[in-house]
Image (spheres, coloured by chain):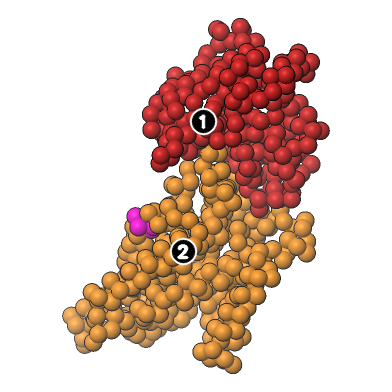
Chain colours: A orange, B red
Amino acid sequence: MNDTIRKLYTRPSALIAWGLVLIFVVVGVLFKAGLVSLNTATIAMDLMVNIGLALSLAIIMSYAGYVSFGHAVFYGLGGFLTGYIVYNAVQTAYTANPQNFNLTFGRALGWWLEGAVLGALASAALAGTVGAAVLRLRGAFFAIATIGLDYAVLYLVKLYHNPLSGSADIPVTQLGAIEGFFYKTYVLVTVFFIVTVIVAYLARVSKFGYGLSAIREDEDAAEVLGVDTTRYKVYAFILSAVLTSLWGSITVWRQNSFGVDIMFSLRESVHMIAMNVIGGLGSFLGPTLGGMVYYALYRATLTKLANSQFIVVGIIVILFISLLPEGLVGLVKLVRPKLRKYID
Amino acid sequence: MAAQLKGARVALEVDNVTKRFGGLTALDHVSFKVYEGEILGLIGPNGAGKTTMFNVITGVYKPEEGRVIYYGEDITGLKPHVIARKGIARTHQVVKPFNELTVLENAMIGALFGTRHGQITEEEARSIAMEILEFVGLAEKAEEPAKVLNIQEKKRLELARALAEEPRLLLLDEVLAGLNPTEVAHMLDLLRKIRREKGVTMIMIEHVMHAVMNLADRIVVLHFGRKLAEGTPEEVARNPEVIAAYLGDPELALKFVRRLGGV
């Protein structure tokens, strides 16, 4: 165990991640000092969210080789429960005392935490029960079943929750009015980014990570070799689901709203998958790099192409899969094979 | 050798095992024992149920009838990883290397999850793995991804991964298949070395007759899922039923026996 933790500050891959963390912290500090624009700080925050989501999915997809197309279900569940709880708490507090209604960051954060924890628990429960059943399937069958899971939960939410005239969307716009909201949120995102990096890194380089690699490469051989494949897969799926759910909670907080069709949409799953594919499967560095490059692509095509940008992004993903199936990390291995052993 | 084994402990007892797939009876009330320290050859024509027997022993398949007893403990129906941790390791007929992982990592996974599961640090696993790779002659390839190995090396890797588990019983499923005569000779040397230096009990499925006849202390012959014969290599090679069902030419069978002392 100590050996594993030591890797956090000795292995080159971990140091790269810490370098990234340092950059994001510096951007935050400079923003606070007024030396960096709101636009730059927003980009930094978006990057953290994207890398965070890529790493969250990576634990099951990239480490264990189970491609989940339904991961938006956890993103949506975290977002929905957070939005629901924060919205209701704000409404209740406002109704109780409309004259002196003053929403502080700390108070709202308490509600957010409640929602985030609830979302994480719900996601863990879903991943540990239905997920565990679905994990008996392999390859395309697993992927298809996860899509089914996503849609089932999406329509359940739509069916039973219509707070505003037929829509299951939840506005929590009051959050944005809190003083210093952006900077404080930046700190929150940074803290959670660090948590995700540590969890995802340890899940990769620990004994657990060796087990997941064995499952990815040949599940039957892994089982016969002593890896408790069923338990490892379920643990990986739960861990991945909880992290994804928490990023969903963060997204609702940042954007001051929950959109049911957006957050549960297959597109969110595809984003996460694309980041992993571009970065390269089987490593921690892959999704980290992939998250950044994918966001850069997204950003570069955003203004010029508006809604048709996904055509370009889609083509790039196809090019990666056909020309560089091992992703950016595979490219590094190809150009400098000696670096292979440093890529965790 | 067989005489010496009379006092030995029973490492594994297969007791009246039956395994069916739909209407097909792959194993039909098969029983045999393996004594500690011996090499048992498991032979028979294709489809005789040899690999199915390995899958039953390792928990991949659950038999419809019968029991598998390992050092006095009934392990029938336990999950494969539980059986592996008790000390039964195997190699696969069609090799299953973890292709994207390095040769060293392949062996390390054996050490980490094998019999010392939970009581071994990564560093210890690494040194055990390295030692085993030296032992099987793959040390120079330690940092290479397993996918670049040739078939002969992949067979050695299967063996290394299984040995890294530090098993008491090793099941070898056609480790000689697909090798050329020189490679077969090398692999046989390695198997003898395992027996000499590790003292591991082994069951080997093999079609390379002169090899199994030379290496095995006793042989069990399967035919259409039933046990056709059991005995020393000499007894089996002289058995008319075995000759008719599997060995074919009686002259050839005797040739195997004549070569017994030589290798």
Outermost residue, left direction? A96
The dot on residue A79 is none
Q: Quadrant of the N terminus of chain B?
A: top right
Q: Position of residue B20 (x, y in %)?
A: 42, 36
Query: Looking at the picture, does residue A122 appear above or below residue A302?
Result: above
User: Quick check: do tags 1 and 2 share a chain?
Assistant: no
Locate residue A198: give its quadrant.
Answer: bottom right
The dot on residue A143 is 2
Query: Looking at the picture, does residue A277 appear above or below residue A177?
Result: above
Categorize mark 1 by other alpha carbons within 10 Å: few (<14), some (14-19), many (20+).
Answer: some
Distance between the alpha carbons at the discs numbered 1 and 2: 40 Å
Q: Quadrant of the C terminus of chain B?
A: top right
The dot on residue B224 is 1
Query: Looking at the picture, does residue B175 appear above or below residue A108?
Result: above
Q: Secondary structure at mark 2?
A: helix
Q: Residue at x 53, y 82 (%)?
A: A42
The region drawn magenta spans: A127-131
Q: How many marks?
A: 2
Q: Position of residue B29 (x, y in %)?
A: 43, 25
Asked if residue B66 can be seen in this view, the reply is yes
B61 in the magenta segment: no
Q: Residue at x 33, y 75 (%)?
A: A83
State if disc 2 and disc 1 touch (CB < 8 Å). no
Q: Amino acid at mark 1?
A: Phe
Q: Main secondary structure of the magenta part?
A: helix
**Badge 1 sits on which subunit?**
B
